[in-house]
Every structure is written in C-alpha cells, then in structure tokens.
Amino acid sequence: MKKGLKEAEKTIKIMKFSKSNAKVKAFKELLAVAKLICSENLPEMEAFSHTMLQKIKNYDDKHGSDLLETLFWYVENNGHLYKTTERMHVSLGSVRYRLKRMQEIGGFDLSSSQGFFDVHAAVNIYFLGLIEVKMK
C-alpha cells in the first residue's frame, strides 16, 4: 500500500477516537505520540498513560483540584511557568505549588528531560483521546 494512503487511513482512525472538534486533519498535523500509536502497542500506551496520570486524576476527583489541567497546560507550554500562569489565569506560586504536588503524587521528576518527556507523552495520549484511560 502506498505511504500516503496508509497515512490517510491512520489519520482517519485517530480522528475517530480523538476528543478534538476538528473533523479533518492532515497526518503531518498529528502529534508525534499519535504517529507512534498503532494497534500493536495500544495496550502498552494505555497502561503507560494510566500509570503516569491515575494518581493525579484520583487526587483531582477527591479534592476538586485542577492538577491534571495544570499539567496539561504546563507541558503544552513546553515547561514555561509564566505561559502556564497566563493561560490558566493563576499566580506563579500556585503553578509552582501544583507542579510540586503533582510530582509528589505522581512520582515523576519534571526537571529531568526523561521525566518531562514521559509526562508529556502520557498527557498527550490522555488528552488527545486516542485511548481511553480507565479512571475510577
């Protein structure tokens, strides 16, 4: 099968599961995580995202907090605290506290490149809606 046709088919499959309101998207517009997902590794990707985010999601549900949303905007803004504060309309101290709390709860280190990459991938998997992360 030709490369373009394969890309189009994968894009259609991904968009069916995506939470995005967009109905049409080019393969080149998909995030790297979406391009890496295939039927063979879907269970692994689901487990990975679940492991990284479940404790934070549970904490949010129990305490009515916005840690997961903060994490999304933090990675969306490439770790820029000020851009995250502007997007969320919260103080710098609030974002710093939330990031510290998430690291304690989730057991990851956002100051390391590997930790940031792992969290970034898990957040994108979850918020793209490419897989369903099982939440309580």
Image (spheres, helix red, strand yellow):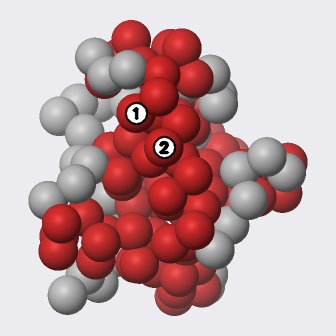
Q: Quadrant of the C terminus?
A: bottom left
Residue 5: percent from the left, percent from the top? 54, 46
Residue 116: percent from the left, percent from the top? 72, 50
Q: Nearer the viewer, residue 126 or 105?
A: 105
Give the residue drawn at x 39%, y 41%. 70
Residue 39: percent from the left, percent from the top? 53, 79
Report helix, strand or loop for mark 2: helix
The reply to whether callout 2 and callout 1 are in contact (CB within 8 Å) is: yes
Q: Nearer the viewer, residue 36 or 26?
A: 36
Residue 7: percent from the left, percent from the top? 57, 46
Give the residue drawn at x 49%, y 58%. 101
Q: Is residue 47 visible?
A: yes
**Could you say which quadrant of the image residue 55 lies in?**
bottom left
Counting every numbered tag in the picture gives 2
Q: Which mark is residue 66?
A: none
Identity of the amino acid at label 2? Tyr
Q: Nearer the viewer, residue 81 or 20?
A: 81
Q: Which mark is residue 94?
A: 1
Identity of the amino acid at label 1? Ser
Give the residue drawn at x 57%, y 23%. 81
- From the viewer's perspective, is 86 left or right of 121? left
In the displayed orientation, state which residue is furthest to the right: 113
Give the residue drawn at x 36%, y 53%. 68
Q: Is residue 132 visible?
A: no
Is 82 situated above or below 46? above
Q: Quadrant of the N terminus?
A: bottom right
Is 39 situated above or below 73? below
Provide the residue designation for mark 2.
Answer: 97
Q: Alpha carbon of mark 2 to alpha carbon of mark 1: how far?
A: 5 Å
Is 9 situated above or below 95? below
